[in-house]
Image (spheres, coloured by chain):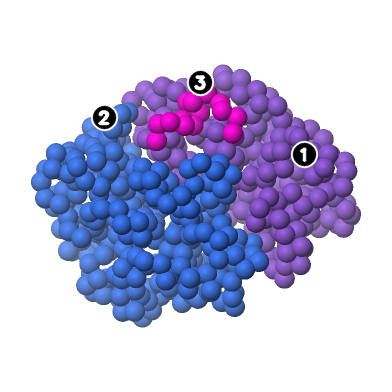
Chain colours: A purple, B blue
């Protein structure tokens, strides 16, 4: 879980190859943002140490020559999509190297990072030189590239694969949007807006109802029925994210049994280790409204 | 473009088969909602005629016996994902039957509709009895099932297919979320919230910058470079949706050339016909803030 040394290089295959020069000269660079976990940056960008970090050259996260024979995951344990990808790699015992992108320091928003992932988000993988971003895309890609057991993302059965795609596509606006908005409203938004908290909490409850009542209806063991798939990894990592604030699964027996079942899979504990440490240490909603400094977050080395 | 007659039946293959009884008895039924285009419902649900529609049995949209040998698209021309799927079918000359789901009347929120698509959204396809929902999932499925030209969604080249997946996954929270929020704030939200309009407008501008500067960088003809793909259909239908309110493409030459290029593809005009009629007749923002009745929308028979 350490940053790599060495000089960074442009890693984009095919039509991404000239992205580096493009991105660094973009007139709108400062406006490019990531929806994902970037709101932290605003909170800490005014501290003195943060300014220093912003101005200093970031350590290279990728060295195109030294890293050409590796599968590298760039991510952060506080990011639910990063955990989903890491979990897939762990549970399938695919060799990879994890490199920490410090999202609390805005490292993913830097121009250097944009030469790796132009969307300035985590996670991203660099698979022997090929860059793939968007966590659901990475999960689809890895399952096919590394020929993992068919239940994760079936190769021959179009309809089974399509059911998984339906969940993955529904997830973004049907579930994840609500979780991200709720966590922001509850803990990061300033000034505190009680109406926004109530509205986003309702959206999260609705999404959990749909998970419990529809996706997991009739005693299904997993989202797709009897077999686990990449959809489950994304879903459960998103559910776990709610533990950053005072949210639980509510009176939803199907959902509760499902999460317990998923948590028993190899890799779950390892992937959530840093995240649970942080949650145990200080919930975000406690943190932001009972304290007025950022020492705890700094200590967590996110 | 007519509703089908005949008795409706449960159409779910495999583990969806018992959805009908489940959905209709769900305690949380009334809370299930769709993020997509459903906000209209609240606006018109208080009119007398609407109440009558809500209480009357809806015409069946699907007859499992009579329709078992068809590819059926259930959608609405005012819905951008519906248009993207219809466009794909048109441009590839795949035989299909279109059936109108009246989203302005909340037909997609009905229990009957939920027996077809449990997420209560449009579009959905029923392909010889197999139900597929989520527009990106449908596009992936159709390209493989009907063996369309490889550039739409390459079957043998994993990395090319992965690039398309990256766009499709980015689209939901990177672009579509902003468009839906902006149109809602600008024209449907009550009371009118100038701050929400400004904030969502900024998100739309940022997304268009990323499209122009990153996805279409360096004179690319299409999102994937030289060849058109299913990603382009989703992207352009979303861009068109902004014409419901006073939004244009701004000073973004790449994006403008791209949209003109896409509009020259077969099917674009046909698919957008009803939508452009509505836009020409009355923009939503004019409509909601200069008038106080819903006659125009009723006339449009959405």
Q: Residues within 10 Å of mark 1 (few under 14, many from 20)?
A: some
Same chain for marks 2 and 1?
no
What segment carries the magenta color?
A: A145-158
C-alpha span from label 3 to label 2? 23 Å
User: Does the image show residue B255?
Assistant: yes
Same chain for marks 3 and 2?
no
Closer-to-camera residue (B156/A7): B156
Location of residue B80 by image quarter: bottom left
Q: Position of residue B169 (x, y in %)?
A: 53, 49
User: In the rendered structure, does residue A147 fall within the stretch colored magenta?
Assistant: yes
Mark drawn on residue A68: 1
Residue designated by label 2: B18
Q: Position of residue A169 (x, y in %)?
A: 46, 45
Q: State which chain disc 3 sits on.
A: A
C-alpha span from label 2 to label 1? 50 Å
Residue designated by label 3: A261
Q: State which chain disc 2 sits on.
A: B
Q: Is mark 3 in CB contact (under 8 Å) with mark 2? A: no
Foreground disc of the pair 2, 1? 1
C-alpha span from label 3 to label 1? 37 Å
Closer-to-camera residue (A178/A68): A68
User: Does the image show residue A293?
Assistant: no
Indicate the secondary structure of the residue bearing disc 1: loop
């Amino acid at each position: 879980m350490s940053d790599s040394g060495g000089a960074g290089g442009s890693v984009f295959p095919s039509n991404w190859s000239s992205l580096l020069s493009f991105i660094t000269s973009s007139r709108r660079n400062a406006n490019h943002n990531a929806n994902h976990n970037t709101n932290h940056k605003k909170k800490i960008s005014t501290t003195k140490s943060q300014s220093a970090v912003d101005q200093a050259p970031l350590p290279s996260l990728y060295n195109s020559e030294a890293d050409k024979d590796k599968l590298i995951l760039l991510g952060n344990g506080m990011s639910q999509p990063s955990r989903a990808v890491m979990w897939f790699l762990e549970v399938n015992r695919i060799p990879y190297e994890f490199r920490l992108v410090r999202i609390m320091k805005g490292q993913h928003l830097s121009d250097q990072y944009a030469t790796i992932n132009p969307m300035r988000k985590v996670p991203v993988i660099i698979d022997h030189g090929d860059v793939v971003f968007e966590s659901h895309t990475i999960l689809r890609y890895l399952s096919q590239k590394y020929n993992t057991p068919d239940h994760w993302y079936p190769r021959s059965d179009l309809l089974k694969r399509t059911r998984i795609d339906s969940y993955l596509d529904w997830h973004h606006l049907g579930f994840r949007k609500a979780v991200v908005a709720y966590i922001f409203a509850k803990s990061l938004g300033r000034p505190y807006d009680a109406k926004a908290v109530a509205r986003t909490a309702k959206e999260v409850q609705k999404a959990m109802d749909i998970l419990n009542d529809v996706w997991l209806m009739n005693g299904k063991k997993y989202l797709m029925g009897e077999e686990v798939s990449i959809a489950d990894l994304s879903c459960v990592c998103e559910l776990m994210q709610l533990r950053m604030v005072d949210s639980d699964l509510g009176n939803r027996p199907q959902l509760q049994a499902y999460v317990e079942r998923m948590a028993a899979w190899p890799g779950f504990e390892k992937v959530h280790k840093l995240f649970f440490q942080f949650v145990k240490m200080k919930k975000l909603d406690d943190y932001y409204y009972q304290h007025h400094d950022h020492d705890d977050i700094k200590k967590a080395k996110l």
